[in-house]
Image: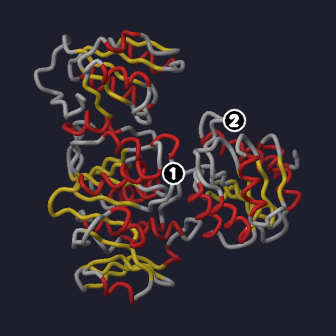
Amino acid sequence: MNTGPFECGKNPSSAYRVTVIGSGVSGSSLAKLASELGYSVFVSEQKQIERSIIDMYQKYGISYESGGHSEEIYQCDIMILSSGISPVAEPVRKALEKGIRVEGEVDFTAPFLKGKILGITGSNGKTTTTLMTGHLFEKAGIRVGIAGNIGSPLADHANRENEVLVVELSSFQLFWSRVLTLDLAVVTNIEPDHIDWHGSLERYYSAKRKITGMVRQGGKVICQERDMKVLFSGEITDQVIPLVRGKDAVHKYSSAIILDEDHAAYNFSGKIIKLFDHSDIALLGSHNLENAAMSSTAFIELGGPINSIREDLASFKAPPHRCELVDIIEGVSYVDDSKGTNVAATVAALRSLHGRKIIILGGKGKGEDYSPLAEAVAAQADLAILIGEEKARIRESLVQTGFTNIKDVNSMEEAVVAASGSSGPGSIVLLSPACTSWDMYQNYMERGEDFKNCVNRIRKGEL
């Protein structure tokens, strides 16, 4: 299998042919980088390509095709995969059979990344933690690049003069990563996810734990104490900075993040540094206290000043569709957690938001077990409104736990109207689907915007 690191940038020549699979945000950025390096580039996209991206391809002399993959994709010296391309996808499988070198976007870009590199992964919270950490560096006046599933692909940061580069890394990217070296890694949490893509839970965990081996000698790994058994085998070394709960737990480790009842602190080799009071964090949900504690510690570990952390965290605003408060109408809070695309994310949202809830669930499934979701719904919600392809499976799990206050709907408008009609002052209407959006929407953002639009129409009296 010809998948070892490729020395891109060495003796660039238009005679060297590069095929990029995928023309989304990451794929088009990879194509542009390869072209700037002097290679002959061909892009192949299964769907249609946006006009603005076609214009960019024409500007750089990049060849492309859309609507499927032709045999031309194999007329190359290396095939580069944009984010999310599965190892069992036909173009990948056939390329490997033909002896073509296959690279993921991380490895192709890695030789051109500058500054200290912080890699952040996790089943949930990695985007918020990436943005929050980047925010701390920006406020401190440190040149920082922020890359990830936030519209800023890794290839866009090639050759930028960053002092620090904060990189969100998905399990898809980690699966293909072999050469990137990190100065620090953060694993926000490990929960079942993307089983449909990886093929099994163990393969998903295997992809996630790869980040621990990407850290340079002397670098650190920040993670949840409860996830250490999944991430590490054998003895836990001083390389690991676990997040623990309660003052007493900290004595088990030379360094640890302490999440206490009303504040967070960092125990650095016996020196306790207070990070923030819980009241300093404006984000909804107790899980965001974990994100803030990990962000603060990563910031300190990479040389950020301590004195401004509390003030700068207080000024950070949550990214859209992640436990985002949309509106409060007649005492009812409407919360958009459309990014809750797996069971663990929705369970976290249910448990971390205080108050009785009406939850909107469903979409396209990932092959997950819904029993933990059903247990959380039974404990935290008064009504479950089901939408999308997974309605029947989610309903079955809910009923098995004894929860029967369930309503099926066919659209977001129906869901929001039903939730509004069943809610009262002090309750929360929560969109946290535990599924992807692909059965009804292009992505979770579009789904979240539909929810917000429906809430806005409730406010105007149009629904």
Residue at the far left in the pictured view = 11
Secondary element at image label 2: loop
Q: How is the image coloured?
A: secondary structure
266 is higher (above) or lower (below) than 452 = below
Structural distance between the alpha carbons of marks 2 and 1: 20 Å
The residue that mark 1 highlights is 193
- Which label number is shown at residue 39? none
1 is higher (above) or lower (below) than 75 = below
Image quarter hosting the N terminus: top left
221 is higher (above) or lower (below) than 56 = below
In front of the other: 183 or 279: 183
* Residue at 58% over, 64% down: 348
* Residue at 62% over, 57% down: 324
In front of the other: 262 or 100: 100
Picture coordinates of residue 178 (x, y %)?
A: 24, 42
- Which label number is shown at residue 440? 2
In front of the other: 325 or 148: 148
Picture coordinates of residue 83 (x, y %)?
A: 41, 35
Picture coordinates of residue 397 (x, y %)?
A: 72, 57
Residue 177 lies in quadrant: top left
- What amino acid type should be assigned to the residue bearing mark 1? Asp
